[in-house]
Amino acid sequence: MQVRTRFAPSPTGYLHLGGLRTALYTYLFTRKNHGVYILRIEDTDQERLVEGATEKIYRSLRLAGLDWDEGPDVGGPVGPYIQTERRDMYLPYAQELVRKGKAYYCFCTKEELAERRAACEAEGKTWKYDKHCCSLTPEEVQAKLDAGVPYVIRQNVPESGEASFDDVLYGHITVDCSELDDNVLIKQDGLPTYNFANVIDDHTMGITHVLRGNEYLSSTPKYNLLYDAFGWEKPVYIHLTPVMADATRKLSKRYGDPSFEDLLEEGYLKEAVVNYISLVGWNPGDNREFFTMDELIEAFSLEGLSKSPAIFDKEKCRWMNAEYIRRMTPEAFDEAAGPWYEKAGIAHMDRAILAKCLQPRVEVFSELPAMVDFLTEMPEFSDELYFSKKMKTNAETAREDLPVILDTLEKLPAWNEESVHDALINLAQSQNKKNGVIMWPLRIAISGKAVTPCGAVEIAVLLGRDETLARIRRSLAALEA
Ligand code: GLU
């Protein structure tokens, strides 16, 4: 059997991390089984649509490396892959259910429903549709249809008995039909609800395995009543536990939790986020943590899926991102850091030196500009920065040493890492001082910061001769004032 799966997002915003994980697990499962991965856009809830959201989904999925074999923009044999473009397909199926007594036309108005609901709730009962229109005769229904009375089509759920299904992760799930509502299948606007479209589409697209969030766990028995009514084979269901922000709540944009693209904008590497999110709710069965996409495909199995909710730990994600940065080739680092160098105004500086200083230290690229802000603007600083217990330096020693350092550097014929380094080391040796006694005050004098991601020599070369000498002169003047 050819495995066919789908990722079926609703275009209601951005790809949140829970959605990314569902898309990823579906992708891994599919690739592992040499199946076909389908993207389907579920846009039948017109009120929740957000302009541009579909394009955002495409972009996020592609950035994550999750390419689909069939979908809206790539086509395929069972399209269209956008539900509103399939709108004419659903009504005949609903009518077939009506003929079979598994669905019925409902003409109740919003006002009537609200009134009966209020009465029901006033008695302390939970409202579900009271099957009012289920008892209309075929003639009554036809007369209303002929008169153009607006209608919906509802599923006719049995009033007693049980509905059930088997989930790979959750096992056998059973619900009492008496607890199920007669959901709307076709809305007044002629579009199907999710409840109906997911069944029709999964069947007509030949979906064999459904991976989705566990919020659908309790409605799936109802969907299976539809499969049974049509006499269709059901897909294998794998409902995933939610991605949590902490022990009590799901990850959610409403609480400011980041989406996939938010993390990329913050300077996380897409490979690192994908790697990290793969482990939020799945365990490879050994203690490996670092995976390329190919390695994930190789290692992935449904048995490794967690049965309890998993927490997205941003600190852990950050740690993994830092590891990814450290493992990059110098070329890859330079390319990834490039836009952040631009932001920081240092893109023109010596890139090899920047990489040497920053690659071991940056954990998330967005913090890079603040780490190097002193390169573009010398901050105000206090003389106390010259104090180092270890080097035995302070403002006094700096006042003595900086003029000699300045003199040495002014005389340098060439300005590069080697020449600046050697000149300063020679100076220290000739004065019988430790290197640090020279390097420390120089670094302070040209950076104005107690902590910098690079040493005095690197900073001097990054700044260039003129700026370095000008900074030393200014700092010296400030010390002497
Ligand atoms: N459109 C649904 C959602 O975004 C998909 C559910 C499913 O995969 O069946 O949650």
Image (spheres, rainbow, N blue to C red):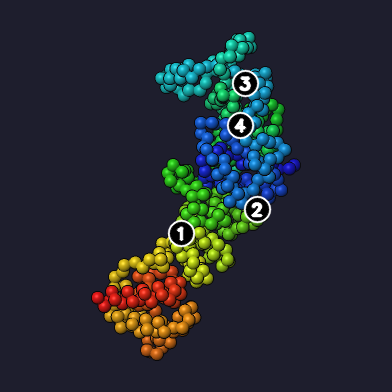
Q: Is mark 3 within 8 Å of ligand 1?
A: no
Q: Residues within 10 Å of mark 1 (few under 14, many from 20)?
A: few
Q: Upstream in the sequence, badge 1 or badge 4?
A: 4
Q: Which of 110 and 382 is in front in this view?
A: 382
Regarding mark 1 in the picture, which secondary structure is present there? helix
Q: Name the residue under label 4.
A: 84
Q: In this view, does 84 lie above or below 401?
A: above
The numbered mark at residue 103 is 3
Q: Does the residue labelled 1 lie within 8 Å of ligand 1?
A: no
Disc 4 versus disc 3: distance between alpha carbons?
22 Å
What is the quadrant of residue 235 in the picture?
A: top right
Q: Upstream in the sequence, badge 2 or badge 4?
A: 4
Task: Give left or right: position of 377 versus 90.
Answer: left
Q: How crowded is mark 4: few (under 14 residues within 10 Å), some or many (20 or more)?
A: some
Q: Is mark 4 within 8 Å of ligand 1?
A: no
> Given the image, on which type of amino acid does mark 1 rest?
Lys
The answer to the question of whether label 4 and label 3 lie on touching residues, with beta carbons closer than 8 A, is no
Q: Upstream in the sequence, badge 2 or badge 3?
A: 3
Disc 1 versus disc 3: distance between alpha carbons?
60 Å
| Numbered disc in front, either 1 or 3 | 1
Q: Which of 187 and 176 is in front in this view?
A: 187
Q: Name the residue under label 2.
A: 297
Provide residue 269's location: percent of width, then percent of height.
Answer: 53, 57
Q: Which residue is drawn at 46% across and 43% down?
A: 253
> Given the image, on which type of amino acid does mark 3 rest?
Ala
Disc 2 versus disc 3: distance between alpha carbons?
42 Å
Q: In this view, does 243 lie above or below 276?
A: above
Q: Upstream in the sequence, badge 1 or badge 2?
A: 2
Disc 1 versus disc 4: distance between alpha carbons?
42 Å
Provide residue 86's location: percent of width, then percent of height.
Answer: 65, 31
Q: Upstream in the sequence, badge 1 or badge 3?
A: 3
